Amino acid sequence: SNRFQYLLSNFKEFFERCNTSFEFWLSNFSYNKVKMEIDNSVFEHSKNIRNIINDAQSKLIAIPAAFVLAATQIDFSNVISIKNIIIIASSFIFSYIISIFIQNQKNALNIVSENVENYKKSFFQTKEDDMPQAKGLPSISKLLKDSYKKIESELINQKAKLGILQFIGWAISVMLVISLPIAKYQQEIKSIFGYTEYTKVEKPIKMDSKIK
């Protein structure tokens, strides 16, 4: 009775497995064999993604250290100097190199994404050729889609993170350039803001005098 109750409570899974096994029965396939084939493919693609990301992390760790070093070496007392020009130029060169590296990593992820799509297409084509009367293969299609859902989500997330890092690499160099004129004209900027605050304070006083 316990087995019968278990069967009733898991009837949906049982039905899907039976349906999948039936679809591949003429080709001598079983649900577990197909699932193992798909799981092996998912594992290989996951390993490729991890290798790409690990390779990126080991090199991108240099970004904050390089820009902190550049920021601490800038001479804000003498803004227009050869030293500052070399530091800014080096910063942009470094940003360009990092951008190229990140783009290469994004291209590698795109290749993995294409391999995933090609595998899914070739998988269905192979099974349909083995068993032409089983066109569509709905149960296997669901199994393949569910198995690769995390892979596809991980690819999207990693591409987005690499894009953010690429933007940050350029943004920091631009910020270093912007900091130079701010440092040079800080007195003028302070006087402008000081004048603005002074006028804001003086306006209500003038209005009060007119009322009186």
Image: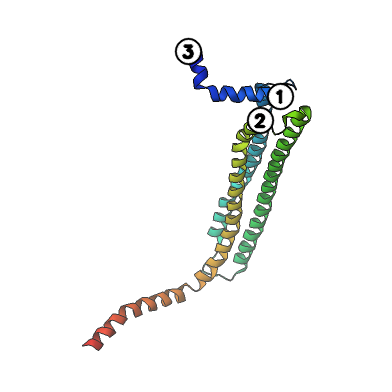
Amino acid type of the residue tagged 1 in the rendering: Phe
Tell me the quarter of the picture where residue 57 sits.
top right
In 3D space, how far apart are the residues under numbered discs 3 and 1 (Cα atoms)?
30 Å
Q: Is residue 13 above or below residue 125?
A: above
| Marks 3 and 1, the one that precedes in the sequence | 3
Instruction: Residue 46: give its label.
Output: none
Kind of element beneath mark 2: helix
Q: Are marks 2 and 1 in contact (CB under 8 Å)?
A: yes
Q: Which residue is mark 1?
A: 24
Q: Nearer the viewer, residue 76 or 9?
A: 9
Amino acid type of the residue tagged 3 in the rendering: Asn
Q: Which residue is mark 2?
A: 140
Q: Residue at x 63, y 56 (%)?
A: 95
Q: Which residue is mark 3?
A: 2
Q: Nearer the viewer, residue 61 or 128?
A: 128
Where residue 167 sits in the image (x, y, percent)?
59, 56
Where residue 37 sits in the image (x, y, percent)?
69, 27
Mark 2 neighbour density, 10 Å: few (under 14) some (14–19) many (20 or more) = many
Q: Nearer the viewer, residue 27 or 171?
A: 27
Q: Residue furthest top?
A: 1
Q: Residue furthest right?
A: 129
| Marks 2 and 1, the one that precedes in the sequence | 1
